[in-house]
Image (tube, rainbow, N blue to C red):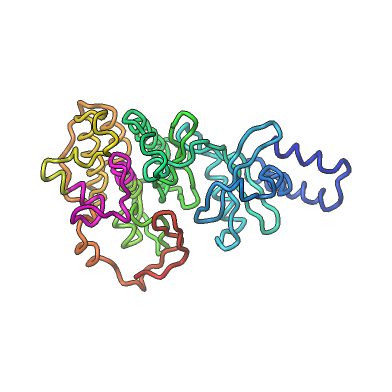
Amino acid sequence: EDLLSFDLSISPEPTKNEQSGVKQRQKHEKEMEIPIFSFSSVSAATNNFSLSNKLGEGGFGPVYKGKLLKGNEVAIKRLSRKSGQGWNELKNEAVLIAKLQHKNLVKLLGCCIEGDEKILVYEYLPNKSLDLFLFGTNNIFALAWGTRIRIVDGIAQGLLYLHQFSRLQIIHRDLKASNILLDEDMNPKISDFGMARSFGGTEPRATDRIVGTYGYMAPEYALEGVFSVKSDVFSFGVLLLEILSGMKNTGFYRSSSLNLLGYAWDLWISSRPLELMDIVMKDSSSANVAIRYINIALLCVQEHAADRPTMSEVVLMLSNELTCLPSPKRPAFSNVRSMVDSIPNPSHWKPEACSENELTISAMDAR
């Protein structure tokens, strides 16, 4: 609304092209049921997409910090022309996000569609993304035990809303530390719904276009293209282990374990689970709660989807210490042989926009 009002101050007497642009935006706004901003106003809010305003770069393009006329700060995601997204794709994504209302989901404020420009405008979250606190070098003491607990609970509540309580039941498909944004009070908000899909019922779906981030993908999805709400549960389990340990699952170098999942499992079966915990929390974390959270994480990363809990069960286990937890089996991808031997014929599937760490790879041939 603030950005739209800025358009009116550009020219007291709009030209024919400006009038045409206004009509086009009004048409899109009616179709999408969210505010449509002009490119000129978005450009002004970001100082013409200045490098000093750039917050980062995602799989579909750069993200900039913007400032509205009233002083409100926003995050502006400018889709790259190389992303392959068109009007229909952007419309579907924007409409999907606009229907989601939860305190642990990033709020979409509007979008801009003009010519080749496709832009999404979100609320701005000053503490940026969770990965900077977990894996960055500047904030090693920032995430206290209580803060991590609040972040875990918030992510779980947001995911439960997507799966069970939103008007459109959603599978996120790219839950990871860099897609968890933090507000001024370090409350988490799930972001980046570009790969999300709505679903009905509980039956898994299959696709030959794999999207997501290696290291967070469930095995049935990464290897066979089959996804369900349990795919998100797997990603949550990986993320939970990362939050507890302060270590990345990908690029993991510790002892003889293949990855963080294998390392957590080795410590679990040798009755040394607390050795997984981030060293900065050594004296502040509750041993019983920490062990319980590790148990829950291992249940979430089970190889078979049927062995993983639902998010409603996860939320119950996190919030109720009296809930009895089952013993986990060996997690997926915990040894290299089982993972390599189960990779399908590369000709059967093709990733669409997968990423390793924060690098997105589009239409990459499987190896």
**In this view of the protein, which residue sits in the foreground, 269 or 209?**
269
Q: Which one is in front, 119 or 258?
A: 258
Rendered view: 350 above or below 166: below
Count of numbered labels shown in the rendering: 0
Query: What residue is shown at x 36% (from left), y 39% (from top)?
Result: 140
Quarter of the image containing the C terminus? bottom left
Camera-nearest residue between 145 and 288:
145
Eyeballing the image, is 145 above or below 82?
A: above
Please say whether residue 256 is one of the residues in the magenta stretch. Answer: yes
Query: x, y percentage for residue 97?
Result: 53, 43
Residue drawn at 37 percent across, 69 percent down: 366
Is 228 situated left or right of 56 in this image? left
Left/right of residue 32 with respect to residue 278 in the rendered view: right
Magenta region, residue range? 236-265
Residue plotted at (28% across, 35% down): 313
Residue 2 in percent (x, y) is at 70, 35
Along the horizontal axis of the image, is 64 left or right of 24?
left
Quadrant position of residue 9? top right
- Taking the view exactly as shown, the residue that stands out farthest to the front is 138
Residue 268: x and y in percent read 15, 43
Residue 192 drawn in magenta: no
| Image location (x, y in percent) of residue 53 | 61, 45
- The residue most toward the right is 13
Left-right relation of 352 to 121: left
Decide: is 184 above or below 112: above
Q: Quadrant of the N terminus?
A: top right
Residue at the extreme left of the image, as rendered: 270
